Amino acid sequence: MPDLHPIRILLVDDQRLMRDGLRILLDLEPDLEVVGEADDGRTAVEIFPDLLPDVTLMDVRMTNMDGVEATRRILTRHPEARVIILTTFDDDEYVFEGIRAGAMGYLLKAVSAEELAAAIRTVAKGGALIEPSVARRVMAEFARLSHPSKQTQEKLLDPLSEREIEVLKLLAQGFANREIADRLYLAEGTVKNYVSSAMQKLSVRDRTQAALRARELGLLD
């Protein structure tokens, strides 16, 4: 039976032509619905509470407030929000700041309509997705950091369990809770509990930050 509730999307981009193009492409997908638009970060922050979209497509460089700051403010007030940064810029500073702000996806505007739609569905289900060339640089940056000591776990007030680390390893590969549950022969609710517990122990707000923080600490090696 088809889903009666399409994924609701907020478009945030300072170029009207880009927003119009995205709306046309996404409206072709029966399970996706554009419910609002904003031409800068400040407007996005203001209208978000009224719309409560499932996924926000966020540009980076905009007047009044850039996409990174808008993402940070939206997630501070609405931790359940899911943001995909969609930009023409793959500058490392924006990549890292966007992820730190809590974005669950980072894509370049060169992606195809099919790839964008698939990314929206993945993030709407709670997964994370970073464009491959961007992901390689993110991983390279963490690899560049000094190798953590064997006492890394001891730095956490409450060390991660073996099962939590196992779940995070699959999460870091982009798997959603249901897929992780299938691979580990667990109930989906159990996986969700492991993810929530790991996020709390790592002092992060979302799944993407949990995976990156765990990798930074050397827990996913």
Image (cartoon, rainbow, N blue to C red):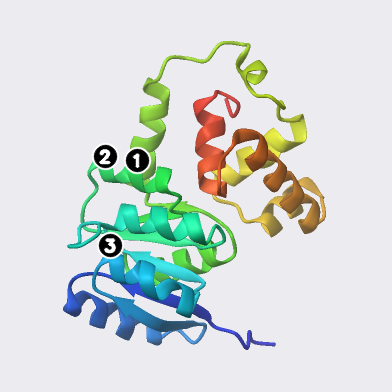
C-alpha distance separating marks 3 and 1: 15 Å
| Residue count near mark 3 (Cα–Cα under 10 Å), binned few <14, some 14–19, many ≥20 | many
Q: Which residue is mark 1?
A: 96
C-alpha distance separating marks 1 and 2: 6 Å
C-alpha distance separating marks 3 and 2: 15 Å
Q: Position of residue 91 (x, y in %)?
A: 22, 44
Quadrant of the image occupied by residue 166: top right
Q: Are marks 3 and 2 in contact (CB under 8 Å)?
A: no
Nearer-the-camera pick, 63 or 169: 63
Q: Position of residue 110 (x, y in %)?
A: 25, 62
Q: Which residue is mark 3?
A: 59
Quarter of the picture holding the C terminus = top right
Instruction: Judge whether 195 appears above or below 157 on screen.
Output: below
Instruction: Judge whether 15 appears above or below 84 on screen.
Output: below
Q: Residue 92's mark? A: 2
Q: Are marks 3 and 1 in contact (CB under 8 Å)?
A: no
Marks 3 and 1, the one that precedes in the sequence: 3
Q: Residue 115's mark? A: none
Q: Could you tell me which secondary element the residue under label 3 belongs to?
A: loop
The residue type indicated by label 3 comes to: Asp
**Left or right of 216 in this view: 85:** left
Residue at 60 percent across and 26 percent down: it is 219
The residue type indicated by label 2 comes to: Asp
Q: Position of residue 187 (x, y in %)?
A: 82, 55
Q: Are marks 1 and 2 in contact (CB under 8 Å)?
A: yes
Q: Could you tell me which secondary element the residue under label 2 belongs to?
A: helix
Quadrant of the image occupied by residue 164: top right
Marks 3 and 2, the one that precedes in the sequence: 3
